Image (cartoon, grey):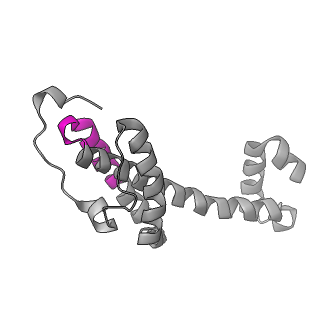
Amino acid sequence: MKKLYEQDYSQWAETMADLLASGKFVELDIENLVEEVRDLSKRERDRLLSSLRLILHHLLKWDYQSHKRSRSWQNTISRERDNIGLYLEDSPSLNQYLNNESLEKIYRVARSDAMREIGLNLPKTCPYNIETALNRLIDIEITKNNSDGA
């Protein structure tokens, strides 16, 4: 089974599912199965934090390049907030990652992304808290010239 895991992950996964369904637990590739189940949790956490990163990135652009605000930025923030809501609905335990420590860690990456994109120096410390990042209204009138920008 370990060889199958290395050669054809998809087939390995199907085989593991079949063995589990049929109760053939002795034949399972336990070592790799445990690793994969742990990775499932990490992937869910990473999706959550990726959405938070996009929110922070776009909030920074929104706040520090107000003359270029766009509906696209607004839509990205709204979409990623919705995504976070769905992730938390499916896996409430992900709430543990919505804390100041995670926020500061993700902010460093979002800040770097935004600085590369807009060419401005941005605050080293996150100007937002979790509540603000996830809930602050950004329904500010967008000028006609910037209504379709990204």
Q: Position of residue 23 (x, y in %)?
A: 77, 66
Which one is in front, 137 or 67?
Answer: 67
Asked if the stretch drawn in magenta spans residue 77, the answer is yes
In the visual, does 64 lie left or right of 80? left
- Please tell me whether residue 25 is drawn above or below residue 51 in the rendered image: below
Magenta range: 65-82
Residue at x 43%, y 59% (from the top left corner): 87
Q: Quadrant of the image for the C terminus?
A: top left
Which of the 4 image quarters holds residue 95? bottom left
In the visual, does 144 lie left or right of 26? left
Q: Position of residue 120 (x, y in %)?
A: 34, 42
- Please tell me whether residue 93 is drawn above or below residue 134 in the rendered image: below
Residue at x 36%, y 61% (from the top left corner): 126
Residue at x 39%, y 48% (from the top left corner): 54
- Is residue 70 among the parts visible in the rendering? no
Q: Position of residue 97 (x, y in %)?
A: 47, 68
Which of the 4 image quarters holds residue 24? bottom right
Which of the 4 image quarters holds residue 146? top left
